[in-house]
Amino acid sequence: MFERAALIHYHEIGLKGRNRATFEDRLRNNLVFAVRDVGAPPIERIASRFIVPLTDRAVADAVLSACAAVPGVRRVSDALVLSREMHDIRAAAECAMEQAIELAAAGSVRTFAVDARRSSTDHPVPSARTNIEVGAHLQGVFGLGVDLSDPDVTVHIEVVQGAAYVYTRRLPGPGGLPVGSSGVVVALLSAGIDSPVAAWRVARRGAVVVGVHFSGSPQTTDTSTADVYDIAKMLSPYGGIGRVYAIPFGELQREIALACPPHLRVLLYRRLMVRVAEAIASVEGAKALVTGESLGQVASQTLDNIAVVDAVATLPVLRPLAGSDKDEIITEARRLGTYEISIRTHEDCCTLFMPRNPATHASVAEAEAAEAGLDVDDMVERATASSVWRDFPCAAYKPARRPPGACVNT
Ligand code: ATP
Ligand code: MG
């Protein structure tokens, strides 16, 4: 019998030149963190791959899927570990094929292919010869047809320095970069469908996400906050969200609604949200804001209105969904598991004090004039002081030293 291991490939981080070692260390830390509750197996780096031994069969599948969720991972293979001797490679290929046939629906495996790669030039057997030898052996044992373009099963063989790996089953990873390699961002997280997907997208590009949610409290119940916590929990296996601040926004909205022209309300709420998010960003050392806006999706998301909101931002505002259609965003939200939470009915600030006819093409001057009667700095101060924050498992997150508000970690 052969030992079994998760063979983890990463891709993009392999291209980062001198930073490569830092990226690999981060990915390794994030992987160690991801498997901490499933036996905490050791993780070793061999020839641009990470190897996680799957000695405990009871948790092997859990280890494979935990690793496959980690940003920066391109794919995870359920591999047999063997020597580079041809007799071992043949035997392991046979073993892997047998398992693949066992796992597949009866009669569904009719064709196969062998895909050998040699990343170590000190190995004398060229990959083409391995393909032919192992292919002939498997054909003899299983009597299956060879199909190189669309086989039912592919037996992958990787020969690296000092070892070889054989597998048929591989799980796609998220790709992207290891969380922590792109700094910290503050994501404006509503309990809606879009912003969780936006936050996930930047986490996948290596950002540690600190979420900021504005609830309608005290004018409404706090159900949207509970849903945002559930969303952060759902995204936890990816390890991208470090902390979520929840901020009661109902009273501030009421003040805006009383003092300002109705058609500008939504934009003024947003401008205040951005200012508060920036106050949190400065405490958390975040270098950008993230929103779930998609160009033209609703009235507040026209180019004119985006400009009105951005005018109060001093940090870059990333909008990873700017060019996405709603159905694409929904598909991604379903895949991430956040969709079902986002469509729950929750009371939140979005439905509070809404004007009948919101401005679709406002100007910065109009917004500034409308705010003249408000003490904006004091509003930001009150918002951050009344925030509560909760932490989520994220290896790369370094908590702010003096966060405003109160901790609600349970
Ligand atoms: P979502 O599906 O993310 O709620 P949406 O389609 O409802 O977005 P808007 O309501 O215009 O669109 O919100 C645009 C963006 O503003 C959101 O994606 C989010 O980043 C931010 N935002 C809106 N409401 C809130 C809130 N209550 N708390 C935090 N951020 C918010
Ligand atoms: Mg919304």
Image (cartoon, grey):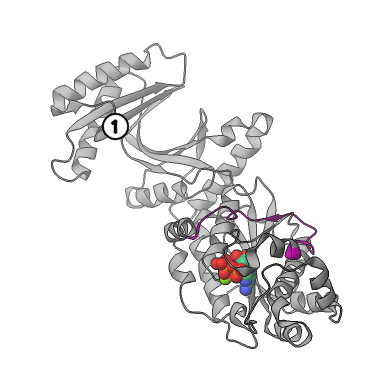
Q: Position of residue 26 (x, y in %)?
A: 61, 43
Q: Quadrant of the C terminus?
A: bottom right
Residue 291 in view, yes or no: yes
- Observer-nearest of 258 and 231: 258
Report which quarter residue 276 is drawn in: bottom right
Above-or-below relation of 102 to 247: above
Seen at 60% across and 61% down, the residue is 296
Q: Give the residue type at disc 1.
A: Thr
Q: Is residue 11 left or right of residue 305?
A: left
The residues colored magenta run 308-326
Q: Could you say where residue 360 lies in the image, as x and y percent from the top left?
A: 66, 69
- Residue annotated with mark 1: 154
Q: Secondary structure at mark 1?
A: strand
Place of residue 397 in the rendered image (x, y in percent of width and height, measured from the top left)? 65, 56
Classify residue 202 as left or right of residue 73.
right
Residue at 59%, 37% (x, y): give it. Answer: 24
